Image: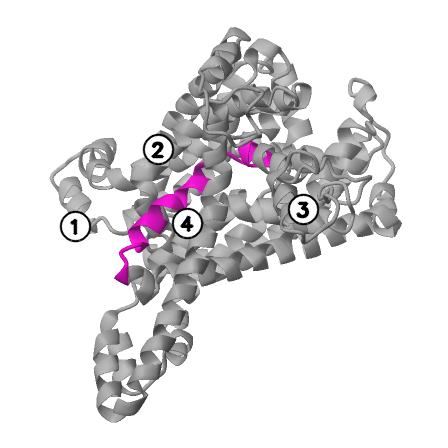
Amino acid sequence: MLLPAFFFLVLFYVYPTLYNLMNSFTDLSLYGLRRGGNWIGVRNYVELMTGKEFRRVLYNTTVWLTLTGVSVRIVLGLLLAFLINSDTLKKYRLTALFQVLLIVPWATPPIVAVVIWRWMLDPRAGVVNTLLVGSGLVATPVAFLSDVSYVWPALITSITWNTLPLVTLTFLASLKSVPGELLEAAAVDGATKLRRARYVVLPHMMPAIVIMTLMSTFWTFNNFAYVWLTTGAGPGLHTNVMATEVYLKAFVDNRLGYSSAVGIVMAALMTGFGLVYLRLIAQRQLREAF
Amino acid sequence: MARQLEAVEVQVLPRVRGRRRWGSLLTEFLILAVALLVLTVMVYPTAWIFFASFKTQETLFSGEFADYTLANYMRLFESGFGVFVLNSLTIALMAVVISTFVAVIAAYVFSRKRFRWKAAVFGSVMLGQTFPWIILVTPVFILFARLGLLNTYKGMIFCYVAVTLPFSVYLLVGYLESVPRSLDEAAIIDGCPPFQVIWRIVFPIMLPGVVATATYSFLLCWSEYLFALAFLTKTEMKTMPLALYAFFGEHTTEWGQVMAASALATLPTLALFLPLQTKLSAGLAAGSVKQ
């Protein structure tokens, strides 16, 4: 009964990975597909490990895109969940409204999100610059997506906008499932709001926080479309990440062999991460289920 | 509960009450202000797309509340955009149906059957989620070229089934845990064949979970860009995200049409998500994460 599932998974994931592994030891080029590449051993990997460009790509992917991007999302998601669930919003019956309206960025396809944010951050027509210049905060419009000092924050802002609702709503669902008696008991014992949040609510939410952090991490790390469509890895190669590097090396430089090597490193990193994920999350689920 | 607490404080510290009320009013005001700001930032960009798609090229950026028109949509469809919408719908719907069907069976097996290496097999399916898709592009392209699957619905549907399968299985295994085992066990004892158990007994009970999973898959397929970019090179086969982006690149001056196309791309997912949102996020928070 598992055969249909495995038909898709083996053909789509296992076979291509083995094919990549093989290619990563060759100098295969996009034009020489029929002829095949020559075996060059680990030379691609040596080039990759010693080259300056790859170090930058690795830094961009891990530090900027993943670490910064995911932390911002998790922290904002938590704050927003607390805000939506706060007594004030409940009092004015705004919680439900928020929950519904938060769907809007989430339901906006990434491609559309890229289009909107490229417009909003545009130096000439964009609303962000209109607001900044209009309020006198800056004198001249900022070219967010082509200025190296703003491009990462701008990119992360647009990705966060699109991905924050899922994180927030998941946290909110978890926050709402905190047993009321627990909170009341803590309140009766004289725990302040802050202490209740720290010692009662957060521990209860921990599983949701862990799973969202892990899932966001591999969704972000592996993502190609956001960076490629927003900045095209530019200006120059300033926002080049691993996913765009694989693409650039294969389809711009025509070096399939080297591109495969980058891909294998990428897959290895994520498999390592995936094993941690399985240990922490799926194992719990496995224990329950089996 | 908060009210109880206040009552206690009033008894103990009656004199501070006045200052307290002003303080809490100020806090309330601040919270509401922040909430309003957040809401604006989250909703404004998408709302603006819908708003702008009905405006003329001249008044697009002026923010005037004048002369609304369907011209952008008319011109969009005249330029043949309907084909791309149809391609996207066909591929996404077929892929979601197949993927959900396969995932329900797989999830049932993982949740109910016992066999050797089960944990390892389930783990490897889950690893599919952590997989970087970008590295599949070249090998699958070559495979598809050999099998004649480039520029076909079949090829794209295959891709999207494979892409959505791991996460669907993951979500459905979570949902299945809330379906009492005694139900299907009773059916098996009564001599019900396994497929009937799945479709007659388990499926109807887990239907909300199935719908949520299918919606999630649909969003993924509907907005997928990378594989469509690589495997669909003929214009008449392209999907909506490709067409939208190409349009955006070529016609940056034609903002009205770009906005109309963006609105069309967002409408189906918005319509699907609104009724389902609580189920989706609750499923991720509780259904899949057992504590």
Kindly indicate the quadrant of the structure image that contains residue A22.
Answer: top right
Chain name for mark 2: B
The residue under label 3 is which amino acid type? Val
Q: Nearer the viewer, mark 4 or mark 2?
A: 2
Quadrant showing the C terminus of chain B: bottom left
Q: Between label 4 and label 3, give the one nearer the viewer.
A: 3
Specify whether residue A225 is in view: no
Task: Provide the secondary structure element on which disc 2 rests.
Answer: helix
Residue at (40, 23) in percent of width and height: B93
Name the residue tied to disc 1.
Answer: B182
* Residue B116: image tag: 4
Which residue corresponds to mark 3?
A133
Whether label 2 touches label 3, CB < 8 Å: no
Instruction: Measure the C-alpha gap from mark 4 to mark 2.
Output: 39 Å
Describe the element under mark 3 as helix, strand or loop. Answer: helix
Write the start and end of the magenta stretch as one range: A91-114
Q: Read off the chain for label 1.
A: B
Q: Are marks 4 and 3 on the same chain?
A: no
Query: Residue at 69% across / 40% down in the picture?
Result: A243
Label 2–label 1 contact, CB within 8 A? no
Q: Height in image: B124 above or below B104?
A: below
**Chain ID, mark 3:** A
Q: Which mark is residue B272?
A: 2
Q: CA distance from mark 2 to mark 1?
A: 33 Å
Chain of the residue on which disc 4 is drawn? B
Q: Could you tell me how far apart the alpha carbons at marks 4 and 3 are, in whole angstroms?
A: 66 Å
Query: Residue at 58% across / 55% down in the picture?
Result: A70
Secondary structure at numbered mark 1? helix
Q: Do the dots labelled 2 and 1 sit on one chain? A: yes
